Image: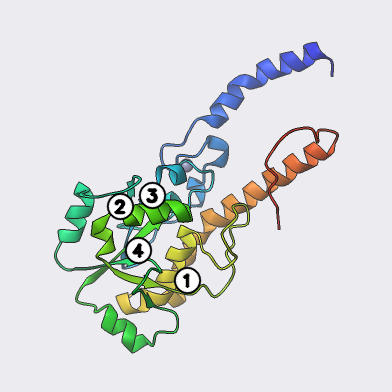
Amino acid sequence: MNIQSYLRRKKADKPKFREDRRLCRACWQPKFNCFCHAIEKFDPKMEFVILIHPKESGRRISTGRMSYLSLDNSHIIRGRYFPNHPKIKILLSEPGYKNIILSPRAGATNLTGLPEQEIRKHFPQDKKLRIFILDGTWSNVGKMFRLTPEIQELQRYFFIPDSPSNIRVRKQPNDKCYCTLEAIHHTIELLGASQGFDTTSRVHDNLLKPFNWMVEGQIKRIKDNQNWRSYGHNHTKSLRVDVK
Ligand SMILES: [Zn+2]
């Protein structure tokens, strides 16, 4: 291809490129990456409040927003820290709820292996369960927690993942760290029965559909990009991502 035909083609492709980059209003992803078609919303019989760091909401794989779009009665609040946040104040003052936070910090109760009768004691059915979860990198989540006294006062719970994370395109600190969406999925698995959600229906696996679609798409794009570079374009300075 000579330079003239290259420039003609580039000019012709420009409107399509712009159209592909336009953000979807629901999932905030560019058109080529919009995952709305894979969302199948369901009611997990518990509420999730996702406190999402601004850097996280702009990522190509933003599993906090993906979870929010998949779960009935969920909330998403964007910010770096949330002291005196009006919506959080309203949520925490609402009667009839047991508010907890998913966090492995000091004093947290381990849900993994907790007998069913203990789980029912912790989460009685006369109160609706509302679970706060922080969505961001490990250092961002630490700051969000430290700078928000309201969520420090919530009872803390954590679990030990029983399988490696499936998020293969963003490096987790270790294989046993779940992203926000995987953590929510596992929480429903552990606590669903105590809240009247039938975990044997596997309806909560709906969460994994847009996630898997997105992960596979990203891996394909990374592989295509790496193949392209291997054809004599190795001078391109670019972050190398290990694809499993
Ligand atoms: Zn979309």
Q: For the residue labelled by badge 2, is the local secondary structure a helix, a strand or a loop?
A: loop
Q: Residues within 10 Å of mark 3 (few under 14, many from 20)?
A: many
The residue at 79%/32% (across/down) is 235
Element at label 3: strand
Question: In what element is the residue under mark 1?
Answer: loop
Sequence-wise first label, 2 or 4 = 4
Q: Report how far apart the C-alphas of labels 3 and 1 lie in the structure.
A: 26 Å
Left or right relative to 53: residue 88: left
Q: Residues within 10 Å of mark 1 (few under 14, many from 20)?
A: few
Q: Earlier in the sequence, mark 3 or mark 4?
A: 4
Q: From the image, state whether disc 2 or disc 4 is nearer to you.
A: 2
- 2 or 3: mark nearer the eye: 2
Return the residue at label 4: 43
Q: Nearer the viewer, residue 202 or 155?
A: 155
Label 4 to label 1, Cα distance in Å?
12 Å
Quadrant assignment for the N terminus: top right
